[in-house]
Image (cartoon, coloured by chain):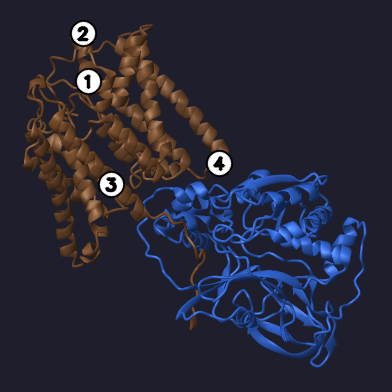
Amino acid sequence: MKFITKKPPIVSSPDKSYKRLLSLHIALIITSISAIFMNGFYNIPEEAGYNLDQSFTVFSMIVIGAIVAFLVELVYALSEGDTTKFNSYRGFVDPINTGILIALLLPITTPVYVLVLAVIVGTYVGKIVFGGRGYYIFNPALVGVLFATISFSSQLGFAEDVVTPLQGLKLVFTDGAMQVLSMQELLIGNFAEIAVGSTSIIVLILLFIYLTNTKVIDLRISGTFLLTVLFMSFGIGYILWAFDNGSTIGYMIVNLLTGLTLFGAVFFVSESVSTPTSRETKLIYGVTVGLLMMLFRTVSENVEGLIYAVLFGNMITPFINRTVKRSNAKSLRITVAVLIVIVLIATAAIGFMLQGQLIELQPAAETALMMGGMM
Amino acid sequence: MITNFKEFKSPARVYIPLTDKEYKLANVKVQVNDSVLKGQVLAYKFKGKVKYPVISSVSGTVVEFKEMMDRYGKIVDHCVIQNDMENKQVELKKYENPTAAQIRTALYQVGLDTMNVDGSFTPLDFEHYNIDHVFINAIFVNEPHYSIEYSFLQENANKISEGVGFIAKAALTENITVFIDKNMPQEVMEQVGIACADKNINFVSIDPRNVDGKALKYIHKTLGSKLGNNILAAGGMYMDCESCKTVYDVVVEGKVPAERNVVLSGDGIKSNAVIQTVSGALLSDMIEFVDGYNEVDEMVCHIGDFLTGTQVTTDEIAVTLTVNAVNFSEYGEEEEDVCIKCGDCNDVCPVGILPQNIMDAELRSVSDRIVELNTDECIECGLCTYVCPSKINVLEWVRRARRRVG
């Protein structure tokens, strides 16, 4: 017997990064199953009953995404001459997660070559170029999706008669056409959406709780983000339809539950590698992403805006990280106070701008869809 | 659960280290073949001009002076005493209702200055710092992983509460905070409550199963200033309840402080136990006393707290009053993952600095940023490494950063 020294601490918490990765993996598989089901049995003309073709399309998209992402990592590992990480399932989890996420973010009409290109760009340019998991600056899945939406916006086109609830909100300003949605349909997910994965609200809320408990989601980021969206959409709606409570609540619910808001809160907004690391900066990041998303949704041409908002947040993360020196109660109080003021001002500014009291907006309908008009 | 309680009070030979981490020089007062009493001064150790006595823990004959490894892993001179098993001790003055100066003198006479060295515990130094607040940790050492029946606390509740009072009196302060275990059995809790009824003590209950540095966070908040590595300099005195009991024994009962409860634990030894021993007993003798080692090729011998202790390369170590626990476990290196920047270490840090950002700055070798991030305030509690899901030794990176900026 021999005594060996090892730097203390000699014990560590049972929490492991791999466990978190695996929880995300499980959550993504559940979302995929839900997406396959939802696209086959809901979201289709009522007389058809079910549409297994759509289910199969979604299934093949997810499988292709996962396989291509894995192949990209494998080719890179082969070129480096070290494939030991693929000896166990451990090495497969991360590439598969990225692949599934990209597939879930694209619309159902995506051609296969666009999907493949998006996954290659996301995994290689978004992740491997920076040094792989743990080192990337931008969320790899969003890099891939951004590439697809910018480069292939016409190929990703949707049928004209399909109007998502968020697009409907834009049409309110141009056509004055209000849409009617029932709360039950909304929760089940029976409404038109662009991304194939962002359908069932109930599943997403359950996954949100599960991932918060397994520490994959940091509530300080995702919670702040959701609160910002909730408050801003309520404020903007209140200013737009002063005293008409029904419209305000409707505006808030559509912004909070449809589109990529919840899907983003679960899967990208608090993705740990590309987000800030300390308490105050996490709050700043959550508010920044929420505020930018609402700005894109209301003022710009974008219907969705989440992808740009999160990528912008990723971009400024190194900068936000550099601004903090320590974390204590005083800096937390200052941060929270400043953030609340910023959200209030932004809400009021956007609300009055839309109402036409600050700036006269050009009617948006005639202008051609610009870059990124898809999302 | 460790319920095995054993007494190992009369080893054949005791080995008293003459110097330690703080006191680097010693002036020996005895010679080989001298007979000594329990509590007799063997030497005076020096830290600059500060002089403290080193006392014998048994009565007997000085056999030799020997170079051995001490519990910090350094080779120092030890005074070896053959135990005559008679336990004759020097006469010490007993005080019924002592003043601050009398308590200080009583503690000085028997050389009781340090009883806890791991983590953020402070020595019993009343002379060189102004103490505003006394903190007592009544939670079992290494608590997140083992728990004992709190029989020590229950039996000695009155003595401990008196001892706490004496320490606060000697430190000329009335602010006392005691950290207690939230999951402590009800009857122990009651016993402690009765003992401390009229003492004006502030209790803070902590759930030790969540390793989140709540006690240290509380101390940092109370003292309200930079803690640094030295809580004493910030005006706080922090120790465990066994020290308080020893202080009571010295002041009121005139006992020589030689006994210590040591927890032997880990999968490297056959049976885990709490051993009541005397300072100077050899660790290897104690292991033999508890049935010896298991068949393990490579082992880690960790002295002190899990998160902050020290490690030694031999078991020929003299246990001193500062050893509260020894863990023998199989050497197992956990696989390090990449940093996923989750920020758990930033959240848990009791002094509110940002270990992840410091590690990042150290990786990029930016000295300015390391200084800017208040790296000097680190108290080396080890919580950042404990919580890391990627099993990175964050504390070691922070230490490197500190060395870089000096």
Compute the Cα span from label 3 to label 2.
Answer: 43 Å
Residue that badge 2 annotates: A176
Q: Nearer the viewer, residue B342 or B300?
A: B300
Q: Is residue A24 above or below residue A176?
A: below
| Separation (CA) of disc 1 from disc 3 | 29 Å
Q: Are marks 1 and 2 in contact (CB under 8 Å)?
A: no
> Chain under label 1?
A
The reply, left or right, for residue B113 in relation to residue B69 is: right
Image: B268 above or below B1: below
Read off the residue under disc 3: A26
Kind of residue at disc 3: Ile
Given this view, does label 3 or label 4 mark the residue nearer the observer?
Answer: 3
Determine which of the numbered discs, if any, sits on residue A165 in the image.
Answer: 1
> Color of chain B here?
blue
Instruction: Where is residue B292? Give x, y as percent.
Output: 57, 81
Q: Earlier in the sequence, mark 2 or mark 4?
A: 2
